[in-house]
Amino acid sequence: MTSVSAHPTAPWRTALARLSPLTPFRKRFQKWWQARLPLNDTLLLTQRNVYILPTSSGWMLALTLVVLLVASINYQLNLGYLLTFLLAGSAAAGMHICHANLRGLTLHLKAPEPQFMGTSTAFELQLSSERKSPRYGIALSVHGTGKAEHHWAWTDVPAQGQASVQVAFRPTRRGLHRVPTLTAETRFPLGTFRVWTYWRPASEVLVYPAPEVPAPPLPPGEPRAGGTGSAPSQGIGEFDGVRAYRRGDPLKLVVWKKAAKSLATGTDDLVSRDAQQAQHHELWLDLARAALPDHEARVSRLTAWVLQADRLGLDYGLRLPGTEITPDTGAAHRRRCLEALALC
């Protein structure tokens, strides 16, 4: 069974990490070091890429063993010798078990789906084990500049089986991003040793712009090329009225609110919007028509328009500097427009 949990740390730890004079040098070293890691969406953990060091509890145990050993030598305590060597042997066995708990594991990243900026992007990771015994207490997270920035996702991997876990990442800007460096670690079984590895996936994730909230009204439609309509459009989505449903009418023209009321009253009368006005005009979402001074704000407004037009089932086109997407509708057209907005 997979369990996902995030452990927020105290704010004072984050503040101390930012005020440390070694932070800029540490970031520069980590950037140089991470650039040397190979790019791969599948990683097999071996002795060459798995590291081990004692934890703070491990160092405290070592200090306790030294004190016990000195006291046993000084007072010639046979039971003290027994306790000291028993604890030391348990720690040594725990070190090998902890290292083997991560060694031999295969990590695989599934292709991430595009996400909107401002929301957490979840990467799905698959952990595979060919060992005949299960692996316990394996944690994964996005690698940061310090422990205070880690939000761990924990899982157990069954014997000769697989486990899936999701790791969250919050991008700070739109566009195409490489998946950040990930880290996996375990402290099973005693917590006296920390075994970890670093993984640099090759996949990229597309981050769409955050839509403007609340969504503004859609812009007015433009006359179609060769159209005969002469009356100016007051706004796409404002139709001449409603009429009785006719066989063959598109479902996007059905007034579903009135249909729900009719069903509630025991009738099944359907009405459709009269799209006579919309037949002579088409909806163009133009970056130049978003009346906002900031470029990112205009992109957010167009993103909100794209989502609103798609939700209403309208045909719409998109105009960006150097890019023009002809009017269409559907999920593929929506995805194409959002990709253009993310990369503009």
Image (tube, rainbow, N blue to C red):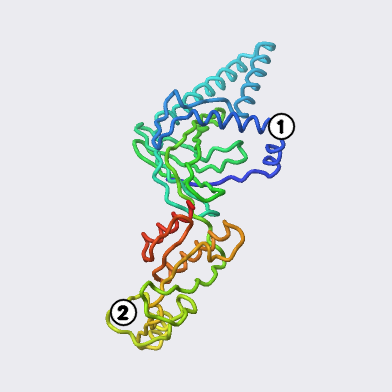
Q: Earlier in the sequence, mark 2 or mark 1?
A: 1
Q: Residue sitting at 46 percent across and 64 percent down?
A: 306
Query: At 47% across and 41% down in the image, what residue appears?
Result: 178
Image: 83 above or below 245? above
Circles 2 and 1: CB distance less than 8 Å? no
Looking at the picture, tell me which residue is in the foreground, 188 or 339.
Answer: 339
Q: Residue furthest left?
A: 247
Q: Considering depth in this image, is 105 or 178 the residue closer to the camera?
A: 178
What secondary structure is marked by label 1? loop
Graded by Cα atoms within 10 Å as few (under 14), some (14 to 19) or many (20 or more), the crowding at tag 2 reads few
Question: Which quadrant of the structure image shows residue 256?
Answer: bottom left
Q: Position of residue 78 (x, y in %)?
A: 61, 14
Which of the 4 image quadrants contains residue 48? top left
Q: Position of residue 1 (x, y in %)?
A: 42, 45
| Residue situated in front as seen by the camera: 45 or 138 | 45
Across and down, in percent, residue 106 comes to 39, 34
- In the rendered structure, which amino acid carries the disc numbered 1? Pro
**Residue, x 64% and y 14% (percent of image)?**
77
- Real-space Cα separation, disc 2 to disc 1, in angstroms: 69 Å
Q: Is residue 271 above or below residue 284?
A: below
Q: Is residue 90 left or right of residue 12?
A: left
Amino acid type indicated by mark 2: Asp
In percent of the image, x 60 and y 41: which residue is there? 149
- In this rendering, the count of numbered labels is 2
Report the residue marked by disc 2: 249
Q: From the viewer's perspective, is 10 left or right of 88?
A: right
* Towards the viewer: 298 or 79: 298
Badge 2 element: loop
Q: Which mark is residue 21?
A: 1
28 left or right, relative to 157: right
Mark 1 burial class by Cα count in 10 Å: few <14, some 14-19, many 20+: few
In the rendered image, residue 204, in percent from the top left (x then y), is placed at 44, 43
